[in-house]
Structure formats: C-alpha cells, structure tokens
C-alpha cells in the first residue's frame, strides 16, 4: 500500500504506461463489432466493467481502463466511451451515498442548500466534460489523452528527479 499510494514516482510511471496503452489500443484495437453501448451482451458488459479494477492502481484512469477494455472486446471507441460513463453512475452514486452517510452529522438545514448547489454545478460541468470528451474521442481518437498522460507523467518524473 505504501509503495503504490505514497510514491508519486509510481503514479507518474502509471500515467506514462497508461498513455502508451491508449496510443497502442487507438491504433491496434480489433475491428469494432459493437457500436451501441446499450446493446452490449451482459457477459461483455461485465468483462468490460471488470477493467475498472485497474483504476485501483494510482495513476490509472477508471474511464481509460474501461474504454481500453471495451475496445479490446470489439466495442467502437465512442460506444466504449459512452459505456464508461454509464458505468460511472452506480460507482459515483455509491461513493456519494457512502460519503453522505459518513458525514450525516454535518447534513443540516443550513448545509443542504450548499450541497444542492454543488450537486447542480457538478452535474452541469460533468455534462460539458462528457460531451467534450466524446467529441474528442469521435474526431481524434484516444491519442490526445495518451499524449497528455505521457506529458503529465514525464513532467512529474522530471520534477521528482530534479527535486531529489
């Protein structure tokens, strides 16, 4: 646990490796056989969903892992990206319920309007980000995200190397 979570070098390396995987899968994925995320067979959806487990490694993106998983199993890029956002709904709902339960003593009539405003703003921003990401994936593929991860991971490695 200390090696994975308390070592920024591991996170930087994960960012770089994840970027390389995105670049590779963007060019070498098997031809897509599924283009509608709502019509994936349950077995394929479950296998793709299991790719989320990789996000337990610091520096690994949950959405990136599931998009790669989808593409490996013949799901078209945009459909894989849409599917990963559908997968986020129960994950984020569960995280919200757990956090709300753990913070229940702080939920008062005074804080509820602030929480509601935060929820609405987060929802609107999420819609904008999802639309933007889907547009990028549709028009340019995964390469921009791969190069961004490599740049951020490389900058982090350079920073930690120079700081040592």
Image (cartoon, rainbow, N blue to C red):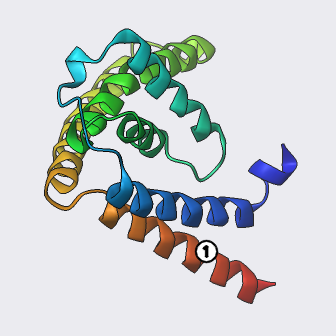
Q: Looking at the figure, which quarter contains the C terminus?
A: bottom right
Residue at 77% from the left image edge and 50% from the top image edge = 4
Residue at 50% from the left image edge and 65% from the top image edge = 20
* Outermost residue to the right: 2
Q: In this view, does 54 lie above or below 161?
A: above
Quadrant of residue 7 within the rendered picture:
bottom right
Q: In this view, does 145 lie to the left or right of 117?
A: right
Q: Could you say where residue 157 lies in the image, as x and y percent from the top left? A: 66, 77
Q: How crowded is the residue under tag 1: few (<14 C-alpha within 10 Å), some, or many (20+)?
A: some
Front-most of residues 114 and 145: 145
> Please, what secondary structure does the residue beneath circle 1 have?
helix
Quadrant of residue 63 within the rendered picture:
top left
Q: In this view, does 45 lie above or below 126?
A: above
> Is there any visible trace of residue 52 in the rendered image?
yes
Residue at 48% from the left image edge and 63% from the top image edge = 19
Q: Could you say where residue 147 lies in the image, as x and y percent from the top left? A: 40, 71
Front-most of residues 130 and 118: 130
Q: Looking at the figure, which quarter contains the N terminus?
A: top right
Q: Could you say where residue 87 lies in the image, as x and y percent from the top left? A: 38, 24
> Is there any visible trace of residue 90 in the rendered image?
no
Residue at 62% from the left image edge and 16% from the top image edge = 102
Front-most of residues 27 and 11: 27
Front-most of residues 80 and 151: 80
Q: In this view, does 74 lie to the left or right of 138?
A: right
Q: Could you say where residue 30 lies in the image, as x and y percent from the top left? A: 34, 45
Q: Is residue 25 left or right of residue 36?
A: right
* Outermost residue to the bottom: 162
Say how many tags the image has: 1
- Residue holding disc 1: 156
């Amino acid at each position: 646990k200390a090696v994975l979570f308390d070592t920024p070098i591991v996170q930087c390396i994960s960012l770089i490796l994840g970027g390389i995987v995105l670049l590779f899968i963007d060019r070498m994925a098997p031809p897509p056989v599924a283009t509608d995320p709502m019509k994936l067979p349950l077995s394929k959806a479950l296998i793709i969903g299991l790719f989320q487990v990789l996000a337990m490694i610091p520096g690994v993106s949950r959405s990136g892992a599931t998009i790669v998983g989808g593409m490996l199993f013949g799901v078209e890029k945009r459909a894989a990206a849409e599917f990963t956002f559908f997968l986020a709904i129960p994950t984020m709902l569960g995280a919200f319920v757990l956090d709300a339960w753990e913070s229940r003593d702080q939920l008062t009539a005074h804080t509820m309007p602030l929480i509601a405003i935060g929820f609405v703003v987060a929802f609107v921003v999420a819609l904008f980000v999802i639309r933007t990401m889907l547009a990028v994936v549709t028009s340019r593929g995964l390469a921009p995200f791969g190069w961004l991860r490599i740049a951020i991971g490389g900058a982090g490695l350079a920073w930690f190397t120079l700081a040592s």
